[in-house]
Amino acid sequence: MTIRLSTPVLVGAVLLGLIGAAVVLATVDFDAWAIRRQSVRLIATLNKPAGEKNPLAIALRVRRIRDFFAQQPVLQPGDPLPAIQTREELTAVAGQALLAAESIRVRVLDRELTWTKPRMEALMRLAVEVVVQEGSETSQLLRVYEVAWIREESRWVIARAHSTDSIRRPAASE
Amino acid sequence: MPPRWQQLLWGRRPLRTAVRAGLLAAGCWLLLRCVCLPMRVEGISMQPTIRDGSWHLANLLQYRWREPRRGELVVIRLAGRRVFYLKRVLALPGERIAFVQGQLRIAGRDLDEPYLREHGDWTLPEVALAPDEYFVAGDHRALPLAQHKAGTVARADIVGGLLR
């Protein structure tokens, strides 16, 4: 089979390329893609390898974690971590948690992204598995978070996050 | 006439074969995404009914036209479409549920649970369910209640039942 490169063939190819680009631009949600990429980076930053004991390395990790959050984040990470209202509190809580744990491994099990109307913030429901090693004890948690992402200085950051679950223990339970 | 291996691979009309293969793939994708979802169970909370590591099919259309019934195994949404809870419905919307030394009580009356091997010693003071809430729990009652994921779930979070 041979194709002769004539003007109609070239015009057709260019047209096809333009249509393809238009379809990609119309269908791909670049904001959603950027938020997913941010969440992947945050999870990677939350993972603390077993050998990391240097306070400077931990301080750098805390600083990197802080950059994923808005100026006034409202966070409820769930037991045993306290509620967080400011970046300073976030720095303190993250620093203490990273220092106390021998290693932290966070794995995303599932995530779902929806947009508020108007499209001001994105709500992500995130299911994660957290494995924390403290001394000889290893605890494994399955947590679901509802995370609100907002755009701040052209970057997507977390404004609010709270621990939630589909199955709720009744208040009266023992 | 194309060679025999090409005939076996593509048939006599490659375009028609490609269209058929595409339709078959789309049908399979739709079936596995919207109707029956294959899932592998992780954890022991549903033992002895469901074994850890076993494979099952979730029927995502089961509760589209009717509501979940007591005793049925339901698939509950966590975050997206990859990980779910699998639990048994114990109490229906509006009912009052309690556990007394492992015995399930609905509206003050003891209820038999033939699917259990052990009743355990769960104790839960009476709880009244909201009009859109179900009470779900696993079958492995030998596990203490504190270590078990049991409680109320909104109807909207029940996405299907167990096909097999």
Image (tube, helix red, strand yellow):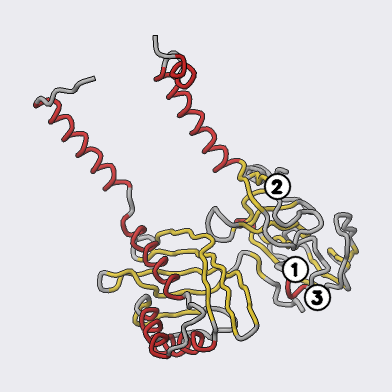
Badge 3 crowding class, 10 Å Cα cut-off, few under 14, some 14 to 19, many 20 or more, is some
CA–CA distance between discs 3 and 1?
10 Å
Which of A68/B161 is in front?
A68
Q: Name the quarter where the N terminus of chain A is drawn.
A: top left
CA–CA distance between discs 2 and 1?
26 Å
- The circle drawn on residue B162 is 2
Image location of residue B148, percent across then percent down: 73, 69
Residue A132 falls left or right of residue B23: right
Residue A64's quadrant in the figure? Answer: bottom left
Image location of residue A121, percent across then percent down: 37, 66
- The circle drawn on residue B11 is none
Q: Amino acid at mark 2?
A: Leu
Residue A2 falls left or right of residue B36: left
Residue B151's quadrant in the figure? Answer: bottom right
CA–CA distance between discs 2 and 3?
29 Å
Mark 1 and mark 2 in contact (Cβ < 8 Å)? no
Badge 2 crowding class, 10 Å Cα cut-off, few under 14, some 14 to 19, many 20 or more, is some
Image location of residue B138, percent across then percent down: 76, 61
Tell me the residue that label 3 is attached to.
Answer: B125
Residue occupying image coordinates x 82% and y 57%: B48
Q: Nearer the viewer, mark 2 or mark 1?
A: 2
Q: Amino acid at mark 3?
A: Pro
Residue occupying image coordinates x 69% and y 72%: A169
- The circle drawn on residue B128 is 1
Image location of residue B129, percent across then percent down: 72, 65
- Of the numbered discs 2 and 1, the one sitting upstream in the chain is 1
